[in-house]
Image (cartoon, rainbow, N blue to C red):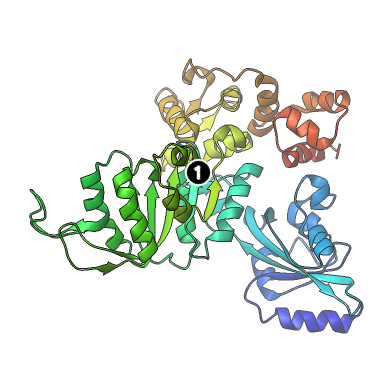
Amino acid sequence: MRSAPQVQALISYLEQEAQPMIVLDTEYNILAANTAYQRQFGTADKPYIGHKCYRVSHHYHVPCDQAGEHCPMKKAFEKRGPDRVLHIHHTPRGPEHVDVELRPILDEQREVVAYVERLAVVRNASARPSAEGLVGRSAAFNAALSALQRVAPSMLPVLLQGESGTGKELFARAVHEASERAHGPFVVVDCSGLTETLFESELFGHEKGSFTGANARKHGLVEMAQGGTLFLDEIGDVPLAMQVKLLRLIESGTFRRVGGLETLHADFRLVSATHKPLKAMMADGRFRQDLYYRISAFPIHLPALRERNDDIPLLVNSMLQRSAAGKGKITLDPAAMRRLQAYDWPGNIRELRNVLERALLFADDRVIRLEHLPTDLHPTVGAPPTATLQGMTTAGAPADETLRQALRSFSGTRRELAAHLGMSERTLYRRMKALGLA
């Protein structure tokens, strides 16, 4: 800012805001912060006023865009308007996902003179090992989480698309918990394996005597979801004859119980999920086109585990934390971790969980070793060098010389080197920074 009175006037305004906010100059320096920021992100032994935002939030020596991340300041400057991004910040509680919105302050000539940054900690995901909920910090995971944060406050129908075992129900629950309907019910409808008659009864309920065995009125899952979220898991398995009734429910917001005459009104937020190729199913007539466009207003791709290899140690530690349940710490031998990171995981997170639960049965001293893993857990072709580097780095035996050799022999950009090593550019930067090579 060009004068102290302008800064003070802006800070006086920010003090009225409940969310953490800071003022930055055009050189990334933090000029001031409101009380909410000081309470959530400030610590007495780590001053931040006058310091670079990227040093305080990320412990970087360079701005985010030079460290392989999206920099909202750069985008806000180019657009002369706000920019929003999901970052992982260092906070007094450890690394956390933070939703960042940066707004430029313009003078009369429309020149940027300062920025106001609003920060909101994402509560429905963890960047540290956690005993519950979504866990991850890789670029692929953060992209899905960022999309979730964008759509959750709205009422748009969400379609979660991903392979089996990628955590679709956890993501659906996170959409619910980040929405204005978080205090309402979260109702799951498992669409797989239901016959047409059973599906209709489960979804809409039935009246007494409507069919053999209907000895009493039954409320359907749509009624149970009133005021909350209805999650249709594996919607690609809905029988074709039932798809038209589901479409009518979504379009009109009304339904009738099986055997009933009364028209009832539905009130739910719709989240659907599938591992099936719905567009291909539309082409051959197995899925209605009109239904597809109703449920897919906001599609989110959930990455396969092989797309978020950096998250495997974090996921492993989280799963072991859940399995321990007060019985004492469980650890993983570095060689076993390298093997887990070298594998392709066709069954995704569900397969990883099964492997760890099986290994625990053999780990008498509560240390999972290589010999405790299934013999068919072979490394993916071409993966061992990358996995060794990542696994050794994460598990505690730094592959310093391996990385130095890669830096000496590779002639491309840092982004290209990260892709060559099979890690994110951000992870590569952290390793280079730790070795003093950044």
Question: 173 or 206: which is nearer to us?
Answer: 206
Residue 400, horizontal then vertical, whole percent: 78, 28
Residue 411, horizontal then vertical, whole percent: 88, 27
For the residue labelled by badge 1, is the local secondary structure a helix, a strand or a loop? strand
Classify 128 as above or below 389.
below
The N terminus lies in quadrant: bottom right
* Image side of residue 311 versus residue 241, left or right: right
Q: Residues within 10 Å of mark 1 (few under 14, many from 20)?
A: many
Q: Quadrant of residue 402?
A: top right
| Residue 328 seen in render | no
Question: 197 or 189: which is nearer to us?
Answer: 197
Residue 119, horizontal then vertical, whole percent: 67, 65
Question: 218 or 196: which is nearer to us?
Answer: 196
Classify 7 as above or below 371.
below
Residue 150, horizontal then vertical, whole percent: 59, 60
* Image side of residue 242 versus residue 116, left or right: left
* Image side of residue 231 versus residue 103, left or right: left
The C terminus lies in quadrant: top right
Count of numbered tags: 1
**In the displayed image of the protein, which residue is found farthest to the top?**
375
Q: Which residue type does callout 1 highlight?
A: Gln
Which residue is under mark 1? 161
| Residue 5 seen in render | yes
Instruction: Tell me what residue is drawn at x 25 percent, y 57 percent.
Output: 204
